[in-house]
Amino acid sequence: MFHDVLRFFAKELNSYLGLKFGVQEDIVVLSNLINQDGKPALNDKNKIVMSLINMEEERVTRPMKNYIRQGENAYAELRPPLKLYMYVMFTAYFEGENYEEALKFIYGVASFFQSHPVFTSKEYAQLGKGAEKITVDFVNTDFDKLGRMWAVMGNKYLPSMVFRFRTIVIQENTIAGHASAVAGIA
């Protein structure tokens, strides 16, 4: 599910950047920056690396109970859906002499999401199950958080930006319990 959503956005970004800047090759790649062994994850340079860096549960609109009818007077209680925000970092992974190109493409990412902040499965069938509507917001990151984030990833700072993708819904039809219909008031 997460990989399908992120792959969709990588594909859309590649189409947009290709048209905007006249490039034939894919610029956006879905990857880590650094492998677990501390070595760079990519062999290719001059790419925008798209990485899932965090997930967070959206709890404001979480329903308490969710029932479905199972016959004349019987209901099944389903577990409430899990609604998630995905935090996605876009990093300009360009070699030193291509710094201006890095800035150009990171600007392209910003302009894409500024002009396309909402994606619905009606417009984009490829979004798939659990992604009926995704709103993309820029995340402001102060210097302290930015420094800690890059330290945790084990990399030196590169031009980057973080966006929040909301809301991804996970709903398995697992029955949590059963209930009978109310027959009357005593």
Image (spheres, helix red, strand yellow):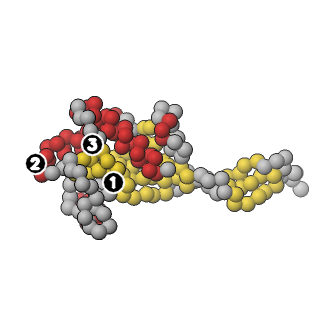
Q: Kindly report the distance in space between the C-alpha atoms of the residues bearing marks 1 and 2.
A: 23 Å
Residue bearing the label numbered 1: 31
Which image quarter is the C terminus in? bottom right
For residue 96, side relative to residue 30 (left or right): left
Task: Tell me, yes or no, whether the two marked residues, 3 and 2, touch with CB atoms within 8 Å.
Answer: no
**Whole-percent x and y of residue 180?**
82, 55
Vertical arrangement, residue 79 with respect to residue 21, above or below: below
User: At label 3, which amino acid type do we have?
Assistant: Ile
Residue 97, numbered circle: 2
**Whole-percent x and y of residue 30?**
35, 50
Residue bearing the label numbered 3: 27
Is tag 3's residue or tag 2's residue first in the polypeptide sequence? 3
At label 2, counting other C-alpha atoms closer than 10 Å, the crowd grade (few under 14, some 14-19, many 20 or more) is few
Q: Measuring 25% from the left and 64% from the top, which residue is drawn there?
A: 39
Q: Measuring 50% from the left and 35% from the top, which residue is drawn there?
A: 125
**Whole-percent x and y of residue 2?**
46, 51
For residue 81, side relative to residue 76 (left or right): left
Is tag 1's residue or tag 2's residue first in the polypeptide sequence? 1
Vertical arrangement, residue 8 with respect to residue 177, above or below: above
Q: Secondary structure at mark 1?
A: loop
Q: Kindly report the distance in space between the C-alpha atoms of the residues bearing marks 1 and 3.
A: 12 Å
**Whole-percent x and y of residue 106?**
24, 44
User: At label 1, which amino acid type do we have?
Assistant: Ser
- Asked whether 29 or 63 is in front, the reply is 29
Q: Secondary structure at mark 2?
A: helix
